Amino acid sequence: MTADGIRQAIIQIISEIAPDEDLTGINPDEPLRDQVDLDSMDFLDIVMELRKRYSIEVPEKDYPQLATMSSTVGYLLPRMESL
């Protein structure tokens, strides 16, 4: 999967978890939680969806790497290249 594909996948997951949020103006370098109303349970739902849809395991110690869209894409790209 490409970086753009990962971005779109993350946006799709967030839109399902927080359907009332406007995701069109996401700044890739600002923390997602500052831009979208996501609580800690929503964040865990995102991690669980990544596991369910793409078989990607994100250990708890790596959660800070999913803070921004850019860092999320950077973290997931090597793990999802073959998808």
Image: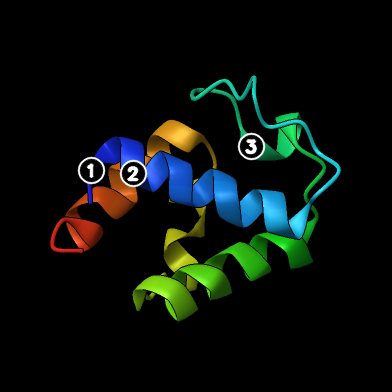
Q: Please state if 9 lies on the left or on the right of 23 as rendered.
A: left
- Checking the image for residue 2, the label placed there is 1
For marks 2 and 1, give the CA distance: 5 Å
| Tag 2 near tag 1, CB within 8 Å | yes
Mark 3 or 2 closer to N-term?
Answer: 2
Compared with 17, 29 (above or below) is above
Examine the image and state in which quarter residue 39 appears. bottom right
Q: Residue at x 61, y 32 (%)?
A: 31
- Please rate how many residues cluster around mark 1, counting C-alpha atoms within 10 Å: few if below 14, some from 14 to 19, many from 20: some
Residue 50 image offset from top left, x and y in percent: 46, 68
Residue 76, horizontal then vertical, whole percent: 31, 53
Total numbered labels: 3
Residue at 50% x, 58% y: name it. 63
Q: Nearer the viewer, residue 42 or 65?
A: 42
Relative to 8, does residue 57 appear above or below in the rendering?
A: below
Please tell me the numbered disc located at residue 32: 3
**Residue type at numbered disc 3:** Leu
* Disc number for residue 5: 2
> Alpha carbon of mark 3 to alpha carbon of mark 2: how far?
18 Å
Name the kind of residue labelled 1 in the image.
Thr
Q: Residues within 10 Å of mark 3 (few under 14, many from 20)?
A: many
Picture disc at residue 76: none
Q: What residue do we see at 80% from left, 38% from top?
A: 21
Circles 3, 2 touching at the beta carbon (< 8 Å): no
Secondary structure category for the residue under label 3 = helix
SS for tag 1?
Answer: loop
Q: Where is residue 8? Give x, y as percent.
A: 46, 42
Q: CA distance from mark 1 to mark 3?
A: 20 Å
